[in-house]
Image: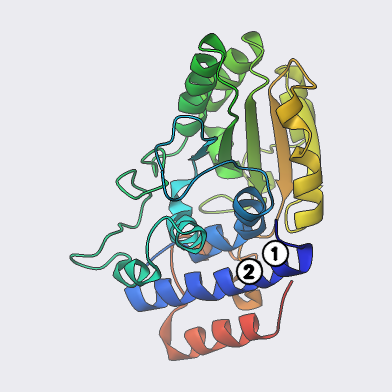
Amino acid sequence: MMTHDELKKLAHDTRTEVLEMCIEAGTGHVTSSMSAVEILISLYFGGLANVNPLEPKWSGRDRVIISKGQCSPLIYSILSSKGFFPKDWLQGFAQKNGNFGVHLQNSVPGVELTTGALGHGLGVAAGVALAAKMNRDLHLVYCLLGDGELYEGSIWESAMFAAHNQLNNLVVIVDRNFMATTDFTENMVALEPLDKKFESFGFNVVTVNGHSTEELISSMQGLRSRKYRQPTVIIAETTKGAGIQSMSHIPVLHGVPPQGAKGIDQARKDLAKGIL
């Protein structure tokens, strides 16, 4: 397992790779990707998700379902670093005859579910977790949600289902960057107190700094032992656009790479300032 300093270095390199992919393609959800970097680094390189890049469909693998499919350049970068496919595939991101589209697609090795339309991932994850319990399989099911997804009613239907069936093999991670597509969440329909909402639906709730690999890994390390009879939700508080100051906290930049030569240069300079 990598040290936390190594994880931080990998997070920085991943941000750089994602930014360059999106600049080259002229599209891609940069800010949505940047907020979730440490979450996915922790899952795949922090000893949490049990997967085998040489056998992507191995039946004993943990299932990692990325419901916020807009962060596809990030998951493609992570999976290539993990060894699921060659790095040079990334050059085809959102390009004609390339391997990857803008939204996440399950034809890519290591991707469990095609997503992009929001609110679907948790329902699938809950079903997969229930099937695992019925089959007495021991793997975990991780599901990454964006906080903007929480406006979808299907999320809460799935949450009720998960708690009712005591799916303690289900780990939901909310990328809580406090922004949706067009505005800050608390200016729209307030989501807070989010922890109390999940508690009322029957979840074991943990809130962490979503850019701290130490806190993320510590919060999920013991879950495989099934300490709780409830599903768990990790509320990972993050910054949309983290690492690129000129793109952070600006809702209108959802779904676009930096614009123009000046914008691209500034984004690169922001990232070059160093590790978070």
Marks 1 and 2: in contact by CB < 8 Å? yes
Residue at (47, 56) in percent of width and height: 79
Q: Which residue is mark 1?
A: 7
Q: Judge left or right: residue 226 versus residue 15.
A: right
Between 250 and 156, the one nearer to me in the picture: 156
**Picture coordinates of residue 22, whole percent (x, y):** 41, 71
Between 164 and 194, the one nearer to me in the picture: 164
Label 2 to label 1: alpha-carbon separation: 5 Å
Colour scheme of the rendered structure: rainbow
**Dot 2 amino acid type:** Leu
Quadrant where the N terminus lies?
Answer: bottom right
Q: Residues within 10 Å of mark 2 (few under 14, many from 20)?
A: many
Residue at (30, 57) in percent of width and height: 101
Q: Residue furthest front?
A: 54
Q: Quadrant of residue 111?
A: top left
**Picture coordinates of residue 223, whole percent (x, y):** 74, 30
Quadrant where the C terminus lies?
Answer: bottom right
Describe the element under mark 1 as helix, strand or loop. helix
Query: On residue 257, which mark appears?
Result: none
How many marks the image carries: the answer is 2
Residue at (68, 20) in percent of width and height: 168
Between 94 and 246, the one nearer to me in the picture: 94
Tell me if I can see residue 126 in this picture: yes
**Dot 1 amino acid type:** Leu
Q: Judge left or right: residue 160 versus residue 207.
A: left
Q: Which residue is mark 2?
A: 10
**Picture coordinates of residue 84, whole percent (x, y):** 42, 55
Q: Residues within 10 Å of mark 1 (few under 14, many from 20)?
A: many
